[in-house]
Image (cartoon, rainbow, N blue to C red):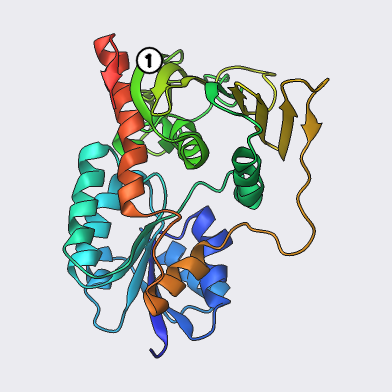
């Protein structure tokens, strides 16, 4: 295979910080075009990274005959239409997380991927990637035994100030049913503890409106600022998810897994892993081993899947549909006031 030619749609922070440098660091990969909402913003990215072509029509970009692959770095509201159009045009697709606005869109993306032989990959949750092999080794060594309870804490005070401008993550028309970091944390935990089978949720919006500098005036906030979820897991364990953007001084996010034989604590920021057997006096830090470490390989994995046929693991469209089913169930449960099967 010759040079892999890539187009970028939506050059946001993650795309500029990770995807573009990552792809440009791989031999025989060329980014030939960038498409942003405005020519000015696209030109700024093109100048920064030496990308030769600037576009503002994403549909024209995905139809280009001189492109092999498309990276979609927009907000979730455009992930489904762009991914489906690119796959239908015969392009390989790397799409930013969260996968889609809702489960129906995610399934439509998977259907489009299944109708082609193109690579379809979702950018994975980056949480604990460096610790992935260590976490799996701890579980395989029987530190936990049978997992009984999982407690997830994702609290922050970033949304306390009601005078702060509305963020796209607080708007369902931009982010869909995705709530704060619920989906990205859930995806991380599903790697080690499997998926949920039911969800019972209560949610709240405390600051009903926020200033909207773009449109002027105020805009209604319709993405929950508090979410409390009780989930039953495939393994039989019970999981409690506590998320808030209005909990000032709450401390770092973490996930705690309690089993018949011990405990495993995943600390998300700064990342750390702690463990203890049931008879130990207390938790101890689990060190990262010396030598090469796992971590962010998203762009390399995408190119390897295209060139070598390596299966997509982090994260396939199939797995993306599975993790989208959880926030969908959470949203339905909060509306209906009852337990929902995932």
Which quarter of the picture shows residue 62? bottom left
Up the image or down, 1 lies above or below 210; here it is below
Q: Residue at x 30, y 43 (%)?
A: 321
Q: Residue at x 47, y 78 (%)?
A: 51
Q: Is residue 137 left or right of residue 10?
A: right
Residue 104, horizontal then vertical, whole percent: 20, 39
Q: Residue at x 37, y 74 (%)?
A: 309
Q: Residue at x 27, y 37 (%)?
A: 102
Res. 177 visible in picture: no
Which quarter of the picture shows residue 1? bottom left
Residue 239, horizontal then vertical, whole percent: 48, 20
Of residues 337 and 340, the one drawn nearer to the viewer in this rendering: 340
Up the image or down, 267 lies above or below 100; here it is above
Up the image or down, 140 lies above or below 70; here it is above
Q: Which residue is mark 1?
A: 201
Of residues 3 and 238, the one drawn nearer to the viewer in this rendering: 238
SS for tag 1?
Answer: strand
Query: Dot 1: within a 10 Å radius of its alpha carbon, few (fewer than 14), some, or many (20 or more) residues?
Result: many
Residue 179, horizontal then vertical, whole percent: 41, 29
Quadrant placement of the C terminus? top left
């Amino acid at each position: 295979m010759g040079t892999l030619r890539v187009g970028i749609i939506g050059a946001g922070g993650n795309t500029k910080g990770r995807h573009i440098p990552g792809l440009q660091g791989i031999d025989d990969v060329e980014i030939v075009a960038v498409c942003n909402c405005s020519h000015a913003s696209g030109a700024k990215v093109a100048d920064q990274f030496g990308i030769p072509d600037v576009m503002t029509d994403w549909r024209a970009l995905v139809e280009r005959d001189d492109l092999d692959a498309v990276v979609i770095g927009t907000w979730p509201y455009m992930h489904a239409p762009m991914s489906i159009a690119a796959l239908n045009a015969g392009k390989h697709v790397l799409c930013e997380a969260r996968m889609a606005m809702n489960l129906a869109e995610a399934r439509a993306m998977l259907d489009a991927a299944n109708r082609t032989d193109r690579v379809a990959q979702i950018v994975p949750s980056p949480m604990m990637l460096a610790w992935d092999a260590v976490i799996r080794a701890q579980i395989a060594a029987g530190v936990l035994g049978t997992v009984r309870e999982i407690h997830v804490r994702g609290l922050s005070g970033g949304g306390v100030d009601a005078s702060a401008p509305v963020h796209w993550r607080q708007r369902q028309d931009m982010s869909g049913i995705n709530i704060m970091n619920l989906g990205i944390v859930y995806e991380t935990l599903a790697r080690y503890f499997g998926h949920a089978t039911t969800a019972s949720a209560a949610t709240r919006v405390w600051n009903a409106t926020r200033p909207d500098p773009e449109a002027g005036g105020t805009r209604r906030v319709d993405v929950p600022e508090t979410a409390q979820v009780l989930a039953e897991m495939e393994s039989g364990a019970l999981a409690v998810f506590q998320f808030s953007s209005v909990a000032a001084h709450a401390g770092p996010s973490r996930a705690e897994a309690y089993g018949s034989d011990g405990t495993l604590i995943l600390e998300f920021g700064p990342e750390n892993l702690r463990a203890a057997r049931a008879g130990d006096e207390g938790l101890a830090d689990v060190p990262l081993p010396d030598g090469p470490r796992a971590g962010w390989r998203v762009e390399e994995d995408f190119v390897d899947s295209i060139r070598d046929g390596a299966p997509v693991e982090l994260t396939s469209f199939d797995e993306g549909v599975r993790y989208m089913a959880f926030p969908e169930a959470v949203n339905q449960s909060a509306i209906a006031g009852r337990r929902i099967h995932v």
